[in-house]
Every structure is written in structure tokens, then in C-alpha cells.
Amino acid sequence: MELLLQGILDLTPGALIMFVIGGLLIWLAIAKEYEPTLLLPIGLGAILANIPHSAAIGVDGEPGILALLFKLGIHTELFPLLIFVAIGAMIDFGPLLQNPKMLLFGAAAQFGIFFTFCLAAWFGFTLLESASIGIIGAADGPTSIVVANRFAPHLLGPITVAAYSYMSLVPIIQPPIIKLLTTKSERLIRMDNLHFRPVSRRTRIVFPIAVTLFVGLLAPSAASLIGMLMFGNLLRESGVVERLSKGAQNELANIVTLLLGISIGAVMQADQFLDRRTLMILGMGVIAFIFDTAGGVLCAKLLNLFLTHKINPMVGACGISAFPMSGRVVYKMGLAEDPQNHLLMHAISCNVGGQIGSVIAGGLILALVK
């Protein structure tokens, strides 16, 4: 009888708290629809990982399903890289190619990464831990996982939860920051005079190859990240492997997202997750997103001092890599200010630029931080 009740008898307060956290993530996924494809499996993974003597983690020295998935998919970086193939197949870089200067905002909106990096170091985290925390500001889950896995695997749980949770909260985080930093007249700026040029099929095909070479040579540590992202996009733009492109966008994305989410639970055990530093990481994650948004908006305001045709500063906020949530947020804010002001194409072009910017930022951190 004691063996049957062993799980109940060995419950700890920490495990009970993790059950609540897992349940909260599941509630956010179902009731609020915040990034449900990831928060739902992460929440259940957290519950499974904290059941005393859970076979999902391991029994008698033999690894369980969560431990195996983590070792094979996260530790080897396989799952994040496969996710990048799927993301690349989903992204249309056409709007960015039509208006290349939007790539500037993809760079400016990475300011939150480096600010948070410095802040974490100031709070006493090691250099490698600080780099892993700062990368939350990339607003890019796979990049956050890769950097944290290499530099601070013991912090992978809170970093991953922060990255994906705040990505889903972009519609809540960004609007007040944008309104704080812009005036009514700035939010009413129309960008109709910035005409989009047609992009040839050849340019669309050459673009992922050129970006792979450029970023790979600039930051070889990011070669796998940018390579898989651009490989997915090449599948899309080549026009000769439509079945593979659709498979990457649908079946591959769904299966890998499912396995990625639940395997994160392996590093959300109470003794690792419930720590004062976890709360600090979650707090600094919010700061990273705030400064990302501010960096993009302020960059647009700075450029407007020199441009004849002004840029709506709200578009700058789309430079973060939260695609396509950030683009939709700015588009809706533009319509709320002026129902005839359609910023969607500009916002999306900036948003896909942020996807490239986040990978480059992650690669630079991997290359420069030792």
C-alpha cells in the first residue's frame, strides 16, 4: 500500500507550486489563447516533470520520455532548428524586399537584448547567464533555446517560458509603450507615398541564399540558425517543391512544436525552476520586450528628422521577431487612430526584418561571448 501511495507521500510544496504553474500555463493557452501551441504542452510537461518518481523523467536510472525528448531534441538543438525550417517556409520576405530600409528597424529593435544582457550582469549573473537572459529580447523562441542551451542550460526552463509567454503577450505589452513614445500626430502619419516595388522570382530565390552566405560568414555560430530559416524560405520560393514547402509549414511545424513544448517540461522541475533568480529572469524578460519596442519606435522618430516622406513610428515597433503578432498589433493600432491608414504591408516588412535581425543578434552573442 505504501508503494501505491509513494507519489502522494513524497509530494513537496515545490511540486505543488509547479502543478499550479503548469495549470496556469494551460489556462492561458485555452482560456486566453496565448500561444496555445506551445504553452499547452509546456504546461502539461511541467506537471509531468514534478510528479514524484515520475516515469516521464526516469525510473531506476533509465531516462523517461521527457528526458529522452530533451536530450535528443533540445540538447542537440534539433527541435529549434527544425522549427526554423517551418518558420522560413511560412515567411514571405516579399514586403521586406520591396522596402529594404525596414531592415533597419529589425536591427534597432534588438536593443532590448543588449540592455538586458548588461542589466543581468549588473544583478550578479555570470557573463554566460546574462547572455542567455538577454536573448529573451530576441522575441524568438528557437534562438532563445539555442543560446540558453549552449550557455546556461540550468536556466533553460525560465528563459523558454519567458520567451514564449511574452511573445504571446505582445498585444498587451506593446500598445502602451508605443503610445507613451509617440504623439497623436505621429500615429496618424500615412505611408501611402512609400510605394512598394514588384519583386522578381529570381530575387526571391537569390535572397535566402545570399542571406545565408552573408550571415554565415559574418557570424559562423549562427550558420545553423540562419541556414535552416533560409532553407525553409527557399523551399517556399523555389516553386518546384510545393509539397515539401506545405509539409514544412504544416506537418513539420505541428509535430516539432508539440515535441518541443512538452520536452521543455524536463527542465521545469521544482528544484531547478523555483528560485529567486527565476523571478528575476521573468522580470528582465518583460524589460527586454519593452526596450525592444522602444528601440524600434525611437529609431523611426530619429529617421524622421532627416526624411522627406515620414515613417509612422509605430511601424518601428514591429522590428521585434514576434511574427506576425507585432505586425497585426501595429496594423490594428493604425486603423484605430485612422480607419483609412493601412500600415499592414509596412508593419509586416518590418516584422520579417526583425526575424532576420534576431538570428543575427543571437549569432553575434554566440560568437562574441565566451
Image (cartoon, rainbow, N blue to C red):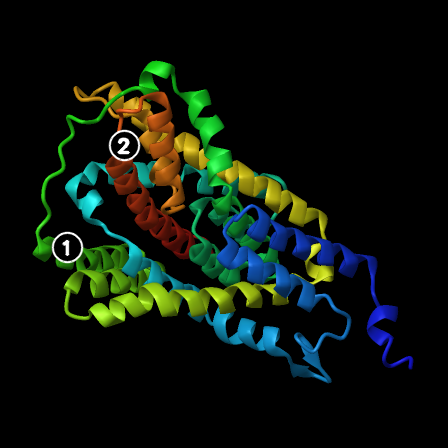
Q: Nearer the viewer, residue 298 or 124?
A: 298
Work out whether residue 73 can be spotted. Answer: yes
User: Is residue 21 shown above or below 120?
Assistant: below
Q: Please say if the residues under marks 2 and 1 sit with CB atoms less than 8 Å apart.
A: no
Amino acid carrying label 1: it is Arg
Q: Residue at x 35, y 65 (%)?
A: 250
Residue 337: image location, x then y, percent: 36, 21
Q: Nearer the viewer, residue 182 or 226?
A: 182
Residue 287: image location, x then y, percent: 53, 36
Q: Residues within 10 Å of mark 2 (few under 14, many from 20)?
A: many
Q: Residue at x 31, y 36 (%)?
A: 105
| Label 2, label 1: how far apart the Cα atoms are | 23 Å
Task: Count up the numbered dots.
Answer: 2
* Residue 97 image-quadrant placement: top left
* Label placed on residue 343: 2
Residue 235: image location, x then y, percent: 22, 66
Q: Nearer the viewer, residue 254 or 218?
A: 254
Secondary structure beneath label 1: helix
Secondary structure beneath label 2: loop
Amino acid carrying label 2: it is Leu
Work out whether residue 109 can be spotted. Answer: no
Q: Is residue 230 left or right of residue 124?
A: left
Residue 216: image location, x then y, percent: 27, 60
User: Is residue 11 shown above or below 56?
Assistant: above
Tell me the residue that label 1 is attached to: 204
* Residue 249 image-quadrant placement: bottom left
